[in-house]
Image: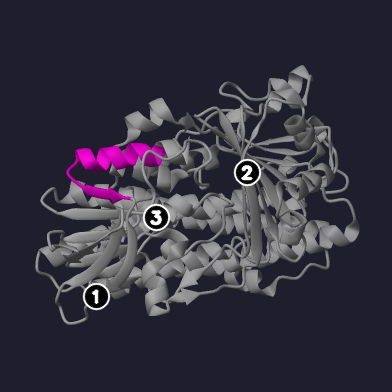
Amino acid sequence: MSTMTDPDVVILGGGLAGLTLALQLVRRDPSLRITVLERHRHPVREGAFKVGESTVEIGAHYFSHVLGLREHLDTEQIRKFGFRFFFSDGQSEIDRCTELGVSRLLPTTSWQIDRGRFENFLTEHARENGIDVRDGAIVRNIELSSDGTLHGVRYECDGVTHELSARWVVDASGRAGLIKRKLDLAQTNDHNANSAWWRVSGLLDPRDWSSDPDWLGRCTPPDRWRSTNHMCGEGYWFWLIPLSSNQHSLGIVCDGDLHPLETMNTHAKAMAWLHRHQPRVAAMLEAGGHELQDFMFMRHFSHGAKQVFSGDRWALTGEAGVFLDPFYSPGSDFIAIANTYITEMIAADRAGKPITAMASLYQQLYFSFYENTLTLYQDQYRLFGDAQVMPLKVIWDYTYYWSLLAPLFFSGYLTSTPVLGQLRTLFGEARTLNLGMQSLLRRWGELNAERGDTAPLDGRLLDQYRIPWFHELNRQLVDTLEPDAFIARMRTDVARMHDLAAEMLAHARREHPGLGDAGLELVLGDHRAPAEPLLSPAWYAEAATVDAAA
């Protein structure tokens, strides 16, 4: 047995969460001694290694600016062309379906990440920065101290058992949840969603879906293939994500009650499911040149945790803690937030400051972000095939994200107690407003479904790029503001959320006069729809009678 007591921090897991935490810690304090224990041997396979390949604004900013990895992302990964949605259930003529997305790149950058390539790079980059990354390491036991003494970790590598002692232990072991299992911290939630996914060789280009020059010309380069493309239907969405290793990631995510996992838990079943629900994509995959690379599935992937941060100097990050849903790609966002809180706690502890209250506050904030974001998904999957309501939901959900959580992270005020204190009431107000809006959207979709067709073949492009205030919300994320100006801007953005909610409620009631939503009305009070609409009439076209010319 080999015994070592050197590290200040032991990180259990050298995947995305663990390696980025190690790099963030050493950028904050180069004197920290960090050991990362990872069970995989590196280099790992590119392409078909892990899912979670799409990034959005917080995660992308974390990788590129907080960790300083912009050069790798620009040269070795794919610049993402935003989210794109096709309401195409059962349709072969995709160019006749409603499309939601941008015609040009929005200002704030994000990327499609080949997880194998990225984690190979992160491993070497960590080692170059003095981080002790030990792969092929299987953790056998963890002894957590509650009296201020060092924690102990025993692991095995190549048949030899080793012991480490460290002041901090962080669990980044993913769904293995080493500390979570040891301390019985697992917590279920009521979001009943499943997924099946696979990767194929070669890239899938939506340009093959149409010969219509107008449809092909709607998007300026880099064109649709660089988007995270979502093919949507009632109770599900199907992703297409391009990877820089010349492979494509594909996956079905679905409400477990509407689309049982047993209908897609083999590749053959998944392809049969795809033939029923997205026949054009199925035909493209079977046309040749797309060799199957892997296949995986997971039941009830969404989960919480009873605790993630402790004043006894341990923490959970990444999927070892909480995981929401791959829709809107929040996985790397929550890694960024958790890692930032952990980095702040370790720095405070190193400076001799008490951290128990800090751990409690950060955990309260982190759980509130998790719970508020979960409302975007839970009981909302029936809406996904509604070409009228779902585009409005996407606009609302992104307005909520870009008005609150994203600017809080970009600004660097995520850990600022004075700023957080001043924003507490505003965040509570926005949370209540969002709960009302999610209820409205759900009921609106139910009424549309009762009426009949929710996805007419109208051929529209609902272009988010051309909404001036939406474009500006994305752009202003990178602005550097002093606390007072930052808080004032957030108040302005939440006021716009009230305008948007009032406008959507008015349109919903115009279309369904019997629609009642006393909860949202109570939140809005006397607030009425703005005189100058935030969205054009095309965004509110009736689900069954839309005019394609709009």
* Residue at (19, 54) in percent of width and height: 34
* Residue at (79, 48) in percent of width and height: 273
**Label whose residue precedes the other's in the sequence (3 or 1):** 1
- 137, 407: nearer the viewer: 137
Q: Within the magenta stretch, is there residue 50?
A: no
In terms of secondary structure, what is the magenta stretch mainly?
helix
User: Tag 2's secondary structure?
Assistant: strand
Give the residue type that dot 1 points to. Answer: Gly
Residue labelled with disc 1: 311
Q: Position of residue 398 (x, y in %)?
A: 55, 50
Q: Quadrant of residue 528?
A: bottom right
Q: Position of residue 393 (x, y in %)?
A: 65, 53
The residue carrying pointer 2 sits among few (fewer than 14), some (14 to 19) or many (20 or more) residues within 10 Å by Cα, namely many
Give the residue type that dot 3 points to. Answer: Ile
Disc number placed over residue 198 in the picture, else none: 2
Spatial CA span between label 3 and label 2: 23 Å
On screen, residue 93 versus residue 342, left or right, reads: right
Q: Quadrant of residue 199?
A: top right
* Image quarter in which the C terminus is found: top right
Residue labelled with disc 3: 335
Q: Quadrant of residue 249?
A: top right
**Label whose residue precedes the other's in the sequence (1 or 2):** 2
Spatial CA span between label 3 and label 1: 20 Å
